[in-house]
Image (cartoon, rainbow, N blue to C red):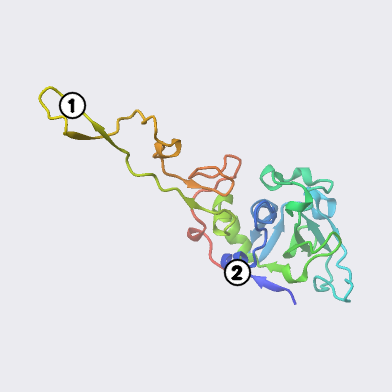
Amino acid sequence: MVGTLNELAKLRDTRFGRPRPRHGLKLLYWFASECVSFENNDMLCQCDPAEGDFGFHYFENRYNQYGNKLLPDIGFPYYVVGNLNSPGAEELPDYVSEDNYADEHNSNTDRIIVSLFDEELFHRVYVTQHHDRSNYDPNATYRISKGLLMIISCMSLYEFLVEMGYYTYIQYVPPMPVINYSPQTTNTVSPDFTAVTLSSSEPAHNDPLEIQNNDAGIQLNDDTTTNNPPENFPKKKGFWKRFCTIL
């Protein structure tokens, strides 16, 4: 039986779309913010899976080698999206497809499967991942509730990825100020006197290069240092907690 996720914490615990460079979390953000809208209790289609928009194609939900189906039979057709090599996938935003590397990176393993009530309404939404080239992993397949989709749609992509633990933060601690001990002698001071002076803005010739930089920052796991989201990320004002509650 497929479990239902209705909180960000539960989605994070599944590790869906992780680690980087897997694209499932970005795909889910795109779906929640651009492919579906919400009206009363309905999830309205903002794309047409039956026509192959964004690489959607029909999902057969066939029996696997153990005689089980990935999803329940509910009388509505299923469509799957997320294969970055599928015809139509080039319509997906760049932030979804930017990490489409070779197969060994597992960057193209995640999928979203939807059932359609009719051409205008989504019935259910699922996330899953490939177990091998032909089959999906039933233990990594979850239904995403309408409430959770609404929460995601109220966030920026950067907020969502951070909340999901997609990035690894490393706090850079600046070095202590360098103290120069240099002998100074004058005509009036004893040769035994040693003056202590703080180093000037000019680095000492024997200081290691890395301690001459006192800038502090947060380093993401792609070895870039920034406190801001990447430029190609869509941005939204405010934080999700101000606008959404779990339904």
Q: Position of residue 158 (x, y in %)?
A: 56, 50
Which comes before the other along the chain, label 1 or label 2? 2
Residue drawn at point x = 61 percent, y = 40 percent: 232
Q: Amino acid at mark 2?
A: Lys
Question: Which residue corresponds to mark 2?
Answer: 10
Q: Is residue 162 visible?
A: yes
Within-10-Å neighbours for mark 1: few <14, some 14–19, many 20+: few
**Percent x, y for residue 69?**
84, 72
Answer with left or right where residue 93 lies relative to residue 57. left
Q: Residue at x 67, y 58 (%)?
A: 17
In this view, the residue in front, 236 or 165, is 165
Above-or-below relation of 176 to 75: above
Can you say which quadrant of the picture contains the C terminus?
A: bottom right
Label 2: which secondary element: helix
Count every numbered label the image shows and give the total.
2
**Amino acid type assigned to the residue bearing label 1 in the image:** Thr
Question: Which residue in the structure is indicated by mark 1?
Answer: 185
